[in-house]
Image: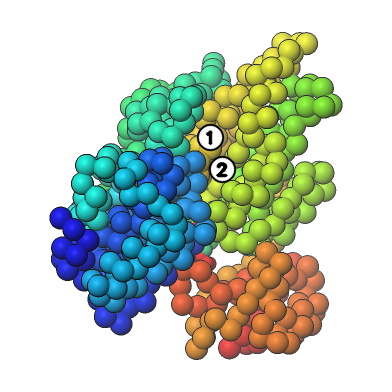
Amino acid sequence: NSIADGANQYPKPEHVNYTYGTAGFRTLATKLPSVLFRVGLLAVLRSKRLEGATIGIMVTASHNPEPDNGVKLVDPSGEMLDPSWEPHATTLSNCPSTESLISTFTTLANHLRVDLHQPANIVYARDTRPSGPELIKALETGLRVFGDSVKINDLGVTTTPILHYVVKATNDKTAEYGVPTKEGYNAKMAKAFTTLIGNKGPLAPLYVDCANGVGAVALKDFTDALGDLLPVHPLNTATTTQGALNHMCGADFVKTKQALPPSVHSSGVLSKPGSRACSFDGDADRIVFYYLNEEKANFRLLDGDKIAVMVAMFLVDLVVKAKLDEEHRLKVGVVQTAYANGSSTKYLTSRNIPVTCVSTGVKHLHHAAQRYDIGVYFEANGHGTVLFSDSAIKALKAASPQSPDAANAIKNLLAFSELINQAVGDALSDMLLVEAVLAHRGWGASDWDAGYEDLPNRLVKVEVPDRSIFVATDAERKLTNPPGLQEKIEEVMRKYEMGRSFVRPSGTEDCVRVYAEAKTNSEAENLALAITDLVR
Ligand code: 16G
Ligand code: ZN
C-alpha cells in the first residue's frame, strides 16, 4: 500500500478547513477519516525523526457530544505533541488532493530531515465513541504505508491518560516509571494508594459519575486491581447506549451548569450526610468533586481550583515534616489559568505558595509546572496533575530522616509521586490523590470546602463574526486587540467590588469567551453582561 492508495481511499472533504488546536483535531466524526489517515503518516514521521521513539495517538473528543470525535498526538515523554509540529499536522490535514498530500509529505520529510529508513513505534487508543473503529481503520491505513518499519501497539478502548502513561513508560529505558501496560499502570497506582492509606482504610464510599464513557471501563479495571480499600460506586456507566456519552452528566456538565447531573440527583446517593461524589469527563482526563451542603442540601462544587489548593497545602506540610535541610527544601508551586477563581489564588498567595498564571490548555500548565520542584497544576475545569522534578525525587530518595515523622513524610511524598500520573492529568489518579489527602487530613468534603469561598462567577459564550480579531496577552488576562477594548473592559470592571473579567477567543470553538467574577452573584452576572455588550 502506498500513500496514494490510502489518500484515494480517504479523500479530504471539500470546504473543510482543519486546525490542530489545543485539543488536537476535533470536529464531527464524519469529517475525520482523511485526517486520521494523515495523522498516521505524521506520527510515523515524528517517530522516525526521533529514531524510533514511541509516539502515541489518542482518538477521542473528550467531553464533546457523541457525534464528534478527534485525534491528538502524544510525544515520547508522554506530553502533548511538541507545538512546533502542530502546524505540520494542520498542513497535512488540509492538502486538497492526493498529489498535493504526497508532495507536501515529501517536502516535510526532507525539511524535517527525517530518515525514512529509521524504525517507527506507534501506540494508539480510542474512547468508547461509536465512530472510533472506523477512524482507527483510517489511522491504521496511514501507519501501514511504511510496511514493516512501523511497529504498532493497539491499546483498544482506553482513557487518554492511560495512553499517555503507556507512551511515557515505553520510552523510559530505565524502566523506573513503570510497566508500559494498562495493568502496569493499575498495579503501580494500587501499590502507591495502599502505601498511602495503610490502616486508614477502608474509606467511606465514593460515587463516581463516569459520563457513560471510557472512564467506566478504566475504573472497573482499577477497582478490580485495588480491592476493598476504597469502596467505589460507579454511576453513568452505559458505554454502549447510543447518545448517552456526556449527555447530562460528566465533569463538563457539572462544572458548566454548576449542578448535579440529574441521574446523580435522582439516585439519591448524595442525600446521606457526609456523602461525596465526583464526575469524570468522556475520556477520563478531567475530574470535579461535589457534595450537598448539610443544612440546605445545596450543591457544592469542588473543582480543579479546590483540588489544587488542598493538594498544594498538603504537599507543603509534608515537605516541612520531611525536614529536608534548607538546601533541599523543595519548592511547591501552583500553576493556574485566568479561569482560576480569584479566591483560590488569593488563598494560596496569602499562604506564601507561589502561583503562576498561564494560558489555557494543558500543555501550558504542564510546562510551567516543570519549573517547580513539586508543581501542582489544575485548570478550574478539572484538568490537572502534580509533577515531581527529577531532582526532587533524588533528594527524597537520598534523604536521611532524623525522626519517624520525617521518615513517614518522605515515604508518603514518594508514594504520591508514584500515585500521580506524571505525563498528564488523569481523573482516576486524581481521584485517588484527593481521597488520599482527605484520608490523611481526616477530612470530609465539607472540611475540604471550608478553606475558602469561591467568588461568584459567570462564563459566557459569545458568537462574533470574526473571533480572530480578539488577541489576548498576559496569560490571556488582557486583550491587545481590538484597539481600545481592554481599556473599556477595565473601566467597567472597576465599578464592581472584587470585579475581575477577561475576554479570550476560544481555542476549540468558533466563539469568544467572557469570564467575570465579583463579590455577589448579581454583580458577577451584571459584570458578565456588561462585558458581553462590549464584545458584541
Ligand atoms: C482544550 C484543553 C483544555 C482547555 C480547553 C479550553 C487540553 C488537553 N485540553 O480542551 O485544557 O481547558 O481546551 O477550551 O489541553 P476553549 O479554548 O474553547 O475555552
Ligand atoms: Zn477530556
Decide which of 148, 494 is in the foreground and name it. 148
* Crowd tier of the residue under label 1, counting other residues whose Cα lies within 10 Å: few below 14, some 14–19, many 20 or above: many
Which is nearer the N-term, disc 2 or disc 1? Answer: 2
Residue 35 seen from this side: yes
Residue drawn at point x = 33 percent, y = 63 percent: 106
Of residues 19 and 455, which is closer to you in this image?
19
Question: In x, y percent, where is residue 401?
Answer: 74, 13
Give me the C-alpha separation between circle 2 and circle 1. 7 Å
Query: How many marks on residues?
Result: 2
- The x, y position of residue 247, in whole percent, is 34, 61
Give left or right: position of 197 versus 103: right
Mark identifier at residue 385: 2
Secondary structure state at the residue bearing disc 2:
strand
Q: Residue at x 71, y 27 (%)?
A: 318
Is 215 situated left or right of 338 in this image? left
The residue beneath circle 1 is: 420
* Res. 440 mark: none
Q: Can I make out residue 208 in this image?
A: no
Amino acid type of the residue tagged 1 in the rendering: Ile
* Residue at position x 40%, y 59% in the image: 110
**As shown in the figure, which amino acid type bears the numbered disc 2?**
Thr
Q: Position of residue 333 (x, y in %)?
A: 72, 43
Considering the numbered disc 1 on the image, is that residue within a helix, a strand or a loop? loop
Residue 183, placed above or below residue 17: above
Q: Give the answer, above or below, for where 314 lies relative to 235.
A: above
What residue sits 50% from the left and 46% below the top? 79
The N terminus - image quarter: bottom left
Task: Verify CB contact (< 8 Å) between mark 2 and mark 1.
Answer: yes
